[in-house]
Image (cartoon, rainbow, N blue to C red):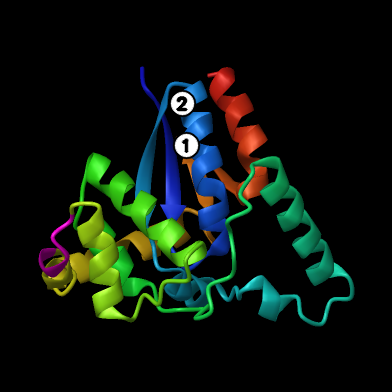
């Protein structure tokens, strides 16, 4: 039986970038497949009452500084030194999520592989249609076709449905993982996920 890690995913989360390659490596070690579920973090926050940590924890003495320390440790451990905050953060990711929903299988992986470095290493402005199209075309996507699919009402509704269903299952932030019905939140849970896969 194939092991599956479901990833509740949104490009706007810097932690989605940070966890992506370590998750890919974990899946390879465990002979597991990654199932991508695109969900809109902004909508998730509205549905759950959650907020980005830099807003939610701004007045908690020491908490933001500690979160930054943990991020630096994770970056060092996984050699993610090309990471830098996107100058447009927090940006609207819904169009990218719609494009991602319109794809399947390996094309979803290829799309994420192209977009995450562009956003979180090269500072791509995702609202710049020409710059976005250039990134997509470089890896073989038909950018015009993807842009058109992103306007399909069924695709738009799929992102809404994914977001609502993820919240119903207990998701409140990105990245969230499911192994069956077991939920894990945050990039720091990779060790727990691997342990569960090893014992399954």
Q: Is residue 138 left or right of residue 3?
A: left
Mark 2 and mark 1: Cα distance apart in space = 6 Å
Q: Nearer the viewer, residue 17 or 51?
A: 17
The stretch in magenta equals 141-145
The residue tagged 1 is 24
- Tell me: 56 left or right of 109: right
Residues at circles 2 and 1 in contact by the CB criterion of under 8 Å:
yes
Q: Secondary structure at mark 2?
A: helix
Report x, y in % for residue 144: 12, 69
Residue drawn at point x = 13 percent, y = 67 percent: 149
Residue 130 drawn at (x, y percent): 24, 77
Instruction: Look at 65% across and 34% down and name the residue there.
Output: 192
Please say if 118 is above or below 87: above
Q: Quadrant of residue 143?
A: bottom left
- Mark yes or no: residue 198 visible: yes
Asked whether 142 falls inside the magenta stretch, the response is yes
Determine which of the numbered discs, if any, sits on residue 77 in the image: none
Q: Where's residue 72, x and y in %? A: 74, 55
The residue furthest right is 61
Query: Which quadrant of the structure image shows residue 131?
Result: bottom left
Is residue 10 at all visible to an observer of this figure? no
Q: Nearer the viewer, residue 66 or 37?
A: 66
- Mark 1 lies on a secondary structure that is helix
For residue 179: magenta?
no
Magenta: main secondary structure equals: helix
Question: Which residue carries the number 2 mark?
Answer: 28
Q: Quarter holding the N terminus?
A: top left
Q: Using a 10 Å C-alpha cutoff, classify the residue at mark 2 as few (fewer than 14 neighbours), some (14 to 19) or many (20 or more).
A: few
Q: Residue at x 49, y 81 (%)?
A: 88
């Amino acid at each position: 039986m194939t092991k599956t890690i479901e990833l509740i995913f949104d490009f706007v989360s810097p932690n989605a970038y940070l966890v992506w390659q370590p998750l890919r490596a974990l899946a390879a070690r465990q002979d597991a497949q990654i199932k991508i579920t695109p969900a809109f973090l902004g909508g998730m926050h509205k549905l759950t009452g959650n907020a980005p940590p830099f807003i939610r924890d701004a007045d908690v003495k020491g908490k933001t500084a500690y979160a930054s320390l943990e991020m630096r440790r994770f970056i060092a451990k996984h050699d993610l030194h090309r990471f830098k905050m996107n100058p447009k953060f927090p940006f609207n990711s819904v169009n990218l999520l719609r494009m991602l929903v319109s794809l399947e299988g390996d094309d979803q992986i290829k799309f994420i592989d192209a977009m995450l470095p562009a956003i979180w290493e090269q500072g791509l402005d995702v609202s710049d249609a020409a710059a976005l199209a250039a990134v997509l075309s470089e890896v073989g996507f038909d950018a015009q076709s993807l842009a058109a699919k992103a306007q399909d009402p069924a695709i738009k509704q799929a992102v809404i449905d994914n977001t609502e269903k993820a919240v119903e299952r207990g998701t409140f932030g990105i990245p969230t993982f499911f192994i069956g019905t077991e939920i894990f939140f945050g990039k720091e849970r990779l060790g727990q996920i691997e342990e569960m896969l090893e014992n399954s």
